[in-house]
Image (spheres, rainbow, N blue to C red):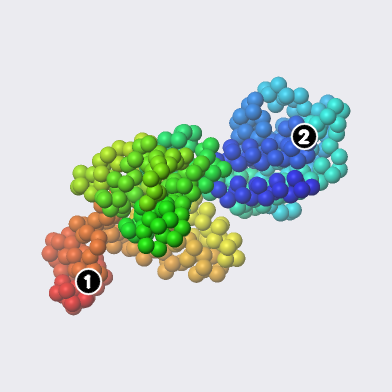
Amino acid sequence: MQQRLSLLVDLSTLLAREVDFETLLGAACERITDAVSAERATIWLIDAENGDLFTKVAMLPEAPGLRQKKARGIAAWVAENGETVRVDDVAKDVRFDPSVDKITGFRTRTIVAAPIRERNDGPVRGVLQVLNKAGEGARFDDEDTRYVEALAEQLGRVFSLTTLRPADKEGRGLTLRGPFNRIVGRSAELTQVYERVQLAAQTDATVLLSGETGTGKGLFSRAIHVNSKRQAGPFVTVDCTTLPSQLFESEVFGHERGAFTGADRKVPGRVETANGGTLFFDEIGELPLELQKKLLRLIQDRVYERVGGRETLHADIRIVCATHRDLATEVRAGRFREDLFYRIRVVEISVPPLRVRGEDEITELIAHFSTIYAKRYERPELVIPKKLRDALVRYTWPGNVRELEHWVESAVVLSPKGEVTEALLPSSSRSPMKLVATAPCTPEGETHGITLGLTLTAAKRAYVEATLEEAGGNKTQACKNLGISRNTLARILAGEE
Ligand SMILES: Nc1ncnc2c1ncn2[C@@H]1O[C@H](COP(=O)(O)OP(=O)(O)OP(=O)(O)O)[C@@H](O)[C@H]1O
Ligand SMILES: [Mg+2]
């Protein structure tokens, strides 16, 4: 029983991570096989598009990625009828389809198969099937059957927390929204990212993730870790934007007792904490030049010293870095060390902005977050009229997936009946005129030549000047584009507002 309970705990831990589904379902099957003393366990999923059953791995190492036409075999019968089946001798059951055994070379004798669904009266999402009770002539008993049934129901509930989501609430089956748990999107642009993440995860190579803010760099960095052989080790982040320069070295490398005033004991750094796992340098492009050179030796040779220490330590870590900047440009501008750049971009993964991933991706992400936040706030899921949906998929989403996620969250909160109205749309998506003025940020963080780091008054003035220039000096037109009066325009240009 102990083992049976810990199985469920293990599964929910796995589900909270960005593992790929193959790993997730494979691990689940492995534990289930042990827990019921079976020889095999398979999780069949129902493809919402055509009703076929499919399994990606599911302890059928002989034939990964099986597909079973609907209406064939015992699992298909369970999927169709929604009832648990126990078969003590498959040779005597006409529903048994021996064709899978022919492919795999496995000999099925006994089966328990139970429907996977979120709640008792809900639609069937898949089938959990265990084969052959271990031991000569052994059969599954009533307790095994009840346990498999309970596990199937648990799986149904946990599926609803993953990205293995039902296509629609009351319909049967599931739609696979991408290969990784918690990461949604099937566009060609994102598929390339998945491929690189999967390949990089198999090795210890240093990875550089680049992409605009909110595109999912943090998410993919964790996906690399949890799909690598270091997954059981720690994932430690160094946030280069928030770490003060004076503390950087002692935070990253640790320090010895007495290394500086106040250092009253030896403290391990992030490198040491990450031992056996992954060290993630987030926003590495923000690191001041003088600190950049301190990372060279660590990244090149995996060796370092604690502040105030003489001993050279070895770091058993994989390094992943992320930045929203174009580091090649930063190198040319003399703001980023060329040698560091070449060392961190062994594998470069560029995460595309949301606006180039296509309309389906936006729709899918809205549905994904709508389910999550509707559940969290106990509100209905969003219903978006066609006209407004069009505006949403055309919108440029300068804050990318994060902006979309926040928009969905606020829309769920602000629409108790789930109906989205025009007033709820992101403000700059409402009128196409304004879209022209909100050109997306370039990687350097400039918009129409406005450099970040200005006071708000100065930024407003620069923005208004740029809009005026765009309007060919026509003040009436500029005021219209900006949605302000001539008086306001004059005050801003005079630097008074
Ligand atoms: N494809 C995706 N599927 C599901 N959620 C996503 C996806 N991409 C991003 N998100 C979510 O969007 C939010 C922003 O993602 P994340 O923090 O990884 O972006 P980022 O590129 O690191 O942004 P920043 O540059 O601002 O740090 C997170 O809540 C993340 O879970
Ligand atoms: Mg981030």
**Left or right side of 152 for 432:** left
Quarter of the image for the C terminus: give it.
bottom left
Residue 266 percent location from the top left of the image: 46, 54
Query: Which residue in the protein does label 2 denote?
Result: 38
**Left or right side of 415 for 136:** right
Q: First in sequence: mark 2 or mark 1?
A: 2
The image quadrant that residue 139 belongs to is top right
Choose between 433 and 206: the one closer to the eye. 206
Residue 157 percent location from the top left of the image: 67, 52
Q: Amino acid at mark 2?
A: Ala
Residue 437 percent location from the top left of the image: 25, 60
What is the secondary structure assignment of the residue under circle 2? Answer: strand
Query: Which residue in the protein does label 1 denote?
Result: 457
- The residue located at (55%, 58%) in the rendering is 372
* Residue at the limit of the structure toward the left, as seen here: 473
What is the secondary structure assignment of the residue under circle 1? Answer: helix
- The residue located at (24%, 63%) in the rendering is 453
Above/below status of 69 relative to 394? above
Residue 426 percent location from the top left of the image: 39, 63
Above/below status of 142 relative to 238? above
The image quadrant that residue 428 belongs to is bottom left
